[in-house]
């Protein structure tokens, strides 16, 4: 009986929306009546979707047009070249992950999608085998459901030479770039999602000046080579898997001048670089106020870390499996826990910075002991071990020319 009451209540809640969506004028009729290359400025109001566009048009909603898909499919399915969509609010897509129900599905090239609001849509903008499109200044959010079953705000699959810039993303799942090359991702602002940006098998993409905050992961690269990550702000990636930037079997990546703050782990490296003849170059980054500054899954090599600033991290660098990070190149970084002098006043410490692992090694090597990380008992053990070592500590890294001030990194 209780179940029937719940079903009845749900039907009463949804029925007005279904009826009102059915009463909206058809936006598809406006599209069908337009000629190729027309400028379509619809009268202000709410229209019924879904809409299929298969010819070149400029559609300008001027911020006064809503298209409501009525909870079925994608609001707009764009299968044409040279289309401009701007000033529209696209809402109420379907709920199918298999069909990638979206605000806009893009299957064409040289399209411009800008200044739109996409809300209550499972996926935001989905590009599949789409090239040379511009996605700019859109505001995107997903369905109000648990984070794991939301759709992705922007999704690129096998799509090349697109420009994804200046979008505002809230409460979606991920932004994903799969099997896609030569895309620019710049000045986007994404918050309260899972992966701000997730690459998989994607090469030669550029990520510049984005703001990623309060997501579970900032940027993660899986099997994605020759990516440039520059001047991004990544903060508050927390939780058991929280990390600012993560690498999984990824090579030839440039990570320059980013600010990575208040994360569980600032930078995470898993068998990266994977190509034994390649390097990953991490320079000029601020890695601060995090649980772990840089975490290596294992004893790996090929990473160059220069002119980075390590400030206020609970642990600067860790390596799993009882190994070290000495096989990577550390030079000219600033370490706020450096204990040394600069007698010749050249801005460089008189002796190298050396990071050793003492009793704090326990939580790195024994998974269950991670629960006690930062607890008084481990802190006391670590203090006693440093005061009077009863075993030889492991050297994790050696920086031959540590900088004396964080400001010197930026000069």
Image (cartoon, grey):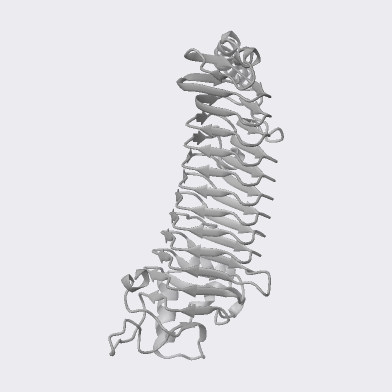
The residue lying furthest to the front in this view is: 37
- Taking depth in this image into account, of 275 and 147 the one nearest to the observer is 275
* Residue at the spot 60% in from the left edge and 13% down from the top edge: 30
Quadrant of the drawing holding the N terminus: top right
- Left or right of 95? Residue 42 is left
Residue 151's place in the image compared with 382, above or below, is above
- Taking depth in this image into account, of 218 and 228 the one nearest to the observer is 228
Image coordinates for residue 69, horizontal then vertical, percent: 60, 21
Image coordinates for residue 346, horizontal then vertical, percent: 31, 84
Quadrant of the drawing holding the C terminus: bottom left
Image coordinates for residue 141, horizontal then vertical, percent: 51, 35
Residue 139's place in the image compared with 340, above or below, is above
Q: In the rendered image, which quarter is residue 146 located in?
A: top right
- Taking depth in this image into account, of 326 and 279 the one nearest to the observer is 279
Let me know if residue 28 appears in the view.
yes
Q: In the rendered image, which quarter is residue 234 located in?
A: bottom left
* Residue at the spot 36% in from the left edge and 80% down from the top edge: 338
Image coordinates for residue 272, horizontal then vertical, percent: 62, 68
Let me know if residue 144 appears in the view.
no
The residue lying furthest to the top in this view is: 23
* Residue at the spot 48% in from the left edge and 13% down from the top edge: 45
Query: Exactly how many numbered labels are in the figure?
Result: 0
Residue 126's place in the image compared with 12, above or below, is below
* Residue at the spot 62% in from the left edge and 31% down from the top edge: 82
- Left or right of 214? Residue 223 is right
């Amino acid at each position: 009986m209780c179940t029937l009451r719940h079903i009845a209540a749900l039907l009463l809640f949804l029925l007005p929306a279904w009826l009102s969506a059915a009463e909206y004028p058809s936006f598809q009729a406006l599209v069908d009546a337009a000629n190729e290359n027309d400028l379509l400025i619809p009268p202000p109001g709410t229209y019924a979707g879904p809409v299929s566009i298969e010819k070149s048009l400029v559609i300008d909603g001027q911020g006064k047009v809503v298209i409501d898909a009525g909870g079925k499919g994608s609001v707009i399915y764009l299968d044409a070249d040279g289309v401009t969509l701007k000033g529209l609010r696209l809402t109420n897509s379907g709920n199918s992950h298999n069909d990638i129900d979206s605000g806009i599905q893009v299957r064409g090239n040289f399209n411009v999608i800008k200044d739109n609001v996409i809300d209550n849509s499972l996926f935001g903008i989905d590009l599949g085998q789409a090239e040379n499109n511009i996605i700019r200044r859109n505001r995107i959010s997903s369905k109000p459901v648990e984070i794991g079953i939301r759709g992705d705000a922007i999704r690129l699959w096998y799509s090349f030479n697109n420009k994804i810039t200046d979008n505002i993303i809230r409460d979606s799942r991920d932004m994903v770039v799969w099997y896609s090359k030569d895309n620019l991702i710049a000045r986007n602002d994404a918050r309260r999602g899972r992966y701000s940006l997730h690459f998989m098998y994607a090469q030669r993409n550029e990520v510049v000046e984005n703001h990623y905050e309060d997501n579970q992961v900032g940027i993660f690269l899986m099997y994605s080579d020759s990516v440039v990550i520059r001047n991004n702000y990544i903060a508050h990636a927390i939780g058991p898997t929280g990390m600012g930037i993560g690498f999984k079997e990824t090579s030839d990546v440039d990570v320059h001048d980013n600010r990575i703050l208040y994360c569980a782990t600032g930078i995470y490296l898993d068998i990266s670089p994977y190509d034994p003849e390649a390097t990953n170059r991490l320079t000029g980054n601020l890695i601060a106020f995090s649980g772990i500054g840089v975490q290596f899954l294992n004893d790996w090599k090929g990473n160059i870390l220069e002119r980075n600033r390590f400030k206020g991290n609970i642990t600067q660098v860790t390596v799993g499996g009882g190994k070290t990070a000495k096989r990577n190149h550390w030079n000219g970084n600033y370490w706020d826990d450096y204990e040394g002098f600069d007698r010749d006043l050249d801005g460089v410490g008189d002796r190298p910075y050396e990071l050793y692992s003492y009793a704090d090694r326990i939580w790195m090597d024994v998974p269950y002991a991670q629960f006690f990380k930062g607890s008084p008992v481990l802190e006391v053990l670590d203090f006693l071990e440093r005061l009077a070592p009863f075993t030889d500590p492991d050297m994790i890294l050696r920086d031959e020319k540590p900088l004396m001030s964080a400001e010197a990194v930026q000069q």
